[in-house]
Amino acid sequence: MPVIDHRRRRLGIAAGTALLTLSVAGCSGLGRTAVGPVTYVTQRDAVINVNSPSVRGCHRLDPAGAKEVINGTLIDIILYRTRDCTGPGSTYVATTFSDMNPPSALPWRSFSTVH
């Protein structure tokens, strides 16, 4: 009998480990954020912080746009001149770097994360 109990215990441990692994892997993509702030300066010189934005989707900036963006997150971002993260003229900003537009350039209006 001890051999059967030992097999059951090992089978139970293996099943529990498998379920734990599956549950962690299945939930790891939910609610993931880019740890740290994305800070930007609007056309009206207001400083806005977006703390730990989601790694999914498009993030809109101030309607007037941003003239400077500082990526303080742990992942890279892409800046867009449109409100829906599409179109030409995007700029890649690596983690801990920033981008500043000259006065003649169009402002940044949205960003997405690179993951």
Image: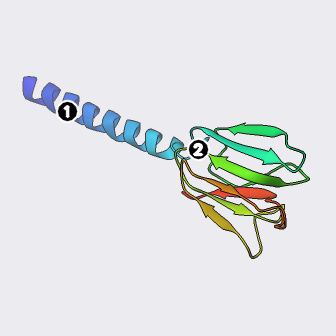
Along the viewing direction, whichever of 10 and 104 lies nearer the viewer = 104
Q: Nearer the viewer, mark 2 or mark 1?
A: 2
In this rendering, is residue 113 above or below 54?
A: below
Where's residue 47, x and y in %? 79, 38
x then y, percent, for residue 51: 67, 36
Q: Which residue is mark 2?
A: 34
Decide which of tag 2 and tag 1 comes sooner along the chain.
1
Residue 64: % across, % down: 91, 53
User: Would you identify the image quadrant in which residue 25 lies?
Assistant: top left
Which residue lies most toward the bottom here?
A: 88
Q: Which mark is residue 10?
A: 1
Residue displayed at 90% across by 52% down: 63
Residue 14 sits in which quadrant? top left
Q: In the rendered picture of this protein, how many numbered marks are placed on residues?
A: 2
Q: Quadrant of residue 18?
A: top left
Quarter in which the C terminus is drawn = bottom right
Identify residue type, mark 2.
Answer: Ala
Between 45 and 75, the residue placed more toward the observer is 45
The N terminus - image quarter: top left
Please, which residue is most extreme toward the top here? Answer: 2
- Relative to 26, does residue 105 appear above or below in the rendering? below
Q: Is residue 4 left or right of residue 22?
A: left
Residue that appears at 65% across and 47% down: 70
Residue 1 seen in this snapshot: no
80 vs 66: above or below: below
Identify the residue at horizontal 70%, vertical 42% (top origin): 39
Mark 1: which amino acid? Answer: Arg
